[in-house]
Image (tube, rainbow, N blue to C red):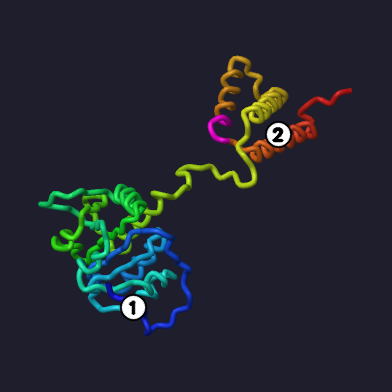
Amino acid sequence: MTSPIKPITWKREGGADLTPPEGESPIVVLVRPQLAQNVGTAARAMANGGLFHLRLVAPRDGWPQATAWHAASGADRILDAATVHGTVAEAVADCQRVFATCPRPRHVIVPVRTARAAAEDLRAICGRGLRTAVLFGPERAGLDNDDMAQADTLVRYPLNPQHMSLNLAQAVMILAYEWWTAAEPTPPRALMTNETRVATKGELEGFLARLVSELDACGFLDNLPKRPGMVRNLRHLFERGEVTEQELRTLHGVVTELSRGRMVRGRVPEEG
């Protein structure tokens, strides 16, 4: 494996502090990439998804190329540490497992995974301390048969069959995203309540009782045959979502002001 090559033609200012975690994580191998900008945007996608190890196989325009750093949007450390290799075999020589992205595997018997399944497998394999790599082909034609012969598992993205074209960074981003979310604890669905909380059923019942009382007082519910259905509709309206305690306080304030306004305007006969 060749030593890391650092660019000397462009003075950069910092970049994100991207430090790989302890243990193994997948190595992204870009095979014969054609444009330095694509290498830079691929590094940016890697940083988004928590992938830190980049290897380049026979980049068309050589390496380093300053435009890669321009396109990396702060993922400088990944490019700084990237290594260059003459062949795919050289790039993956120290790996125990190799995955390869391909659009349509043909005439080959080999395990095929979606990006999500591949990420799950990669998490399990890396967790066992095995070194893994994922091959991405050149922009125009992708990996050829000899490239894929270096891999033990193929990765296919199930996209719209009428238009499955991805650029290099997009292909890397899909896998990086799945790698990250495979271990990401963020719940897939949540209600952001900020400083408040979801109201209890008792609090909601208290508000509904007050609302119905005020609606009775102002005559809104005077149609007795329709009254039960109208009350149920109001209940369904507020029970349908997770009303927060803060929202209930606001609604109580609305009812208070409406009631006060009704009395001030003489809509309720004054006593005595």
Contact between marks 1 and 2 (CB within 8 A): the answer is: no
The quarter in which the N terminus is drawn is bottom left
Residue located at (31% from left, 73% from top): 83
Badge 1 or badge 2: first in the primary sequence: 1
Q: Which residue is mark 2?
A: 255
Q: For the residue marked with disc 2, what is the amino acid?
A: Val
Counting the numbered discs, the total is 2
In the picture, measured across the screen, residue 236 lies left or right of residue 272, that is left
Could you tell me which residue is drawn at 78 percent across and 26 percent down?
268
Between disc 1 and disc 2, the foreground one is: 1
The residue segment tinted magenta is 237-242
Q: Crowding near pointer 1: few (<14 within 10 Å), some, many (20+)?
A: some
The residue pinned by badge 1 equals 5
Q: Residue furthest front?
A: 129
**Residue 89, relative to residue 210: is it above or below?**
below
Closer to the camera, 174 or 2? 2
Horizontal and vertical percent position of residue 63:
29, 78
| Image x and y of residue 55, in percent | 30, 69
Which element is circle 2 on?
helix
Q: Secondary structure at mark 1?
A: loop
Look at 24% across and 73% down and name the residue there: 85
Query: Residue pushed farthest left?
Result: 107
Quadrant where the image shows the C terminus = top right
Q: Is residue 176 above or below residue 219?
A: below
The answer to which image quadrant residue 131 occupies is bottom left
Q: Is residue 185 left or right of residue 261?
A: left
Q: Amino acid at mark 1?
A: Ile
Find the distance from the CA under tag 1 to the CA under tag 2: 70 Å
9, 35: nearer the viewer: 9
